[in-house]
Amino acid sequence: MMTRSCMGRLLLAAAIAMTSCGRPKQADLIVYNALVYTVDSAFSTAEAFAVQDGRFIAIGTSDEIRTNYKAAETIDAHGKPVYPGFYDAHAHFTGFAQTFGQADLTGAKSFEEVIDRLKAFRTEYPNTTWLRGRGWDQNLWENQTFPDREKLDEVFPEIPVYLVRIDGHAAIANGRALKLAGIQSPMTVTGGVIEVKNNRLTGMLIDNAMGLVASKIPEYTTADLTKMLHQAETECFAVGLTTVSDAGLNQRNIKLLDSLYLTGALRIRNHAMAGFSEKNLRHYLAKGPYVSERFTVRTFKLFADGALGSRGACLLEPYADAPTSGFLLSSIAAIDSAIARIAASDFQLATHAIGDSANRVILNIYGKYLQGKNDRRWSIEHAQVIAPQDFEKFEAYSIIPSVQPTHATSDMYWAMDRLGPERVKGAYAYRQLLSETGLLALGSDFPVEHINPLYGFHAAIARVDQNGYPNSGFQPENAISREAALRGMTCWAAYAKFEEDKRGSIEVGKKADFVMLAADIMTAPEESLRDIDVLRTAINGETAYQRN
């Protein structure tokens, strides 16, 4: 069987033969004097390529390409490395955009610092009707317990305050916000928790309880959200992202995105996942998958459980540091029913599962409907804690692990506390998952983590944080190779979305999405990987970002 890389070389040879006794062929763009990582099946390298009508038409040496093609635009890469455009297989692009209208609480070292940042935000934006923020993490504080709304009520008594935890699975609201949501006394919420201490509402809301308050917050106007989306796109281009998988969207956001793509107002490629709800199921199952040049809706995003950091992840045994096992966000019967409906459609399914119990439930229900090897390309998003006997189910049912390497290096400081020394061995087990399935789709889960894909590349291969901690790496036996990490953020991510024939590698006929870096991530010292600059990001051969 002829590989695409072989076909590409034959096409180039044919082009050379055709032009050897005639005039050079026309192209729109030539990039030469580069170190081109094609990330094809052979993981080959080249020096140059030509682009026409948004696709790669020839790949080879600089002499070959420049002799046989002429173009209106040429780029001398001066020996710099060029890769396929980076693909984030699990992100929240629209959610990231909305953070530009909120206080950034990421990295706050105490709840007092959270309050100070809110004060500064309130001063800068005095006309907001709700005070919103995102990114706090109690695990960074000296006192690692959840915060209490008492200080919020004292400093912000009149304006409703709603602050989402870094993982997006917990929030704290002040008394004003609770009152607007009708939460005045202890309540039971299926798949969620309204925290009560000493018969008093602390303001902490976990998982499904968050929606009681979030549903009362006025939505951003179309104009404001459009502006935020443009800002998010600019940020993504600057770190080399050309495609994102936008997880868990409602109909309003999907319609807005579609309108922006139809008019050419957005350029970044977006594989959107419709958020799981009865409303979305009825609407999109009736319409069927939607695939366009840069915007696709062919996946449903389902939540099985919450997050490990807020102890909402569903475990087989209680947490090592708390008398709870977490919980599923819906009953097993409800999850099974939803999956059955999706299985009968042409849609993909991507399910958030963190705890070993949640992963087992989803793996078993997937197996019930997938019934062995298949090409449905369903995924488990995060696949964070897996019981030893469940790893083989990924291979048995052709389930794709969609993982985020920076989760491992963000959680490693307290993961042992949550899981204990034995259970943690099955957590963030990327090499083991790779050995089962033969591929990993890599993402970041931004804005939960930083948007820069090189942070994930570094975490995947070194298993250390930005400071090189720990020296030997966190569970280094589950580090993956540089080639696997690069494939995970290019061709494997594309494969996970049925897009491997369009993008994910630099091959003849594919979309000309590429990124040029200041140094080679395949050979650069591990400690320098996070600091490598993006020099150029291109989509369809058109420059979307260029570093001055």
Image: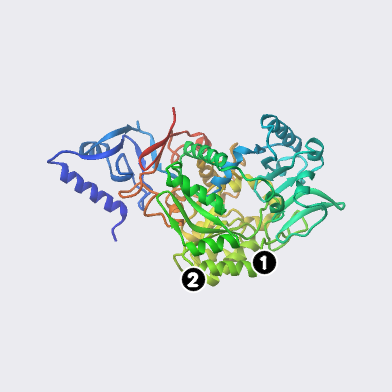
Residue 248: where, in percent of width, then height? 57, 53
Q: Secondary structure at mark 1?
A: loop
Q: Is residue 141 left or right of residue 280?
A: right
Q: Residue at x 31, y 51 (%)?
A: 5
- Label 1: few (<14), some or many (≥20) within 10 Å? few
Q: Quadrant of the C terminus?
A: top left
Considering depth in this image, is 440 or 193 the residue closer to the camera?
193
Q: Secondary structure at mark 2?
A: loop
Residue 405 appears anywhere in the view: yes
Considering depth in this image, is 294 or 125 the residue closer to the camera?
125
Q: Which amino acid type is marked by label 1?
A: Ser
Q: Which amino acid type is marked by label 2?
A: Gly
> What residue did someone put label 1 on?
331
Q: Is residue 375 left or right of residue 251?
A: left
Q: Is residue 142 left or right of residue 198?
A: left
Q: Looking at the image, which residue sits at the far left?
A: 21
Say whether disc 2 or disc 1 marks the residue closer to the N-terminus. 1
> What residue did someone put label 2 on?
372
Q: Are marks 2 and 1 in contact (CB under 8 Å)?
A: no
Residue 419: where, in percent of width, then height? 69, 55
Q: Nearer the viewer, mark 2 or mark 1?
A: 1
Q: Is residue 196 left or right of residue 225?
A: right
Residue 218: where, in percent of width, then height? 66, 45
Q: Quadrant of the N terminus?
A: bottom left
2 shown above or below 78 = below
Considering depth in this image, is 262 or 521 the residue closer to the camera?
262
C-alpha separation, residue under disc 2 versus residue under disc 1:
24 Å
Residue 166 falls in image quadrant:
top right
467 shown above or below 279 = above
- Label 2: few (<14), some or many (≥20) within 10 Å? some
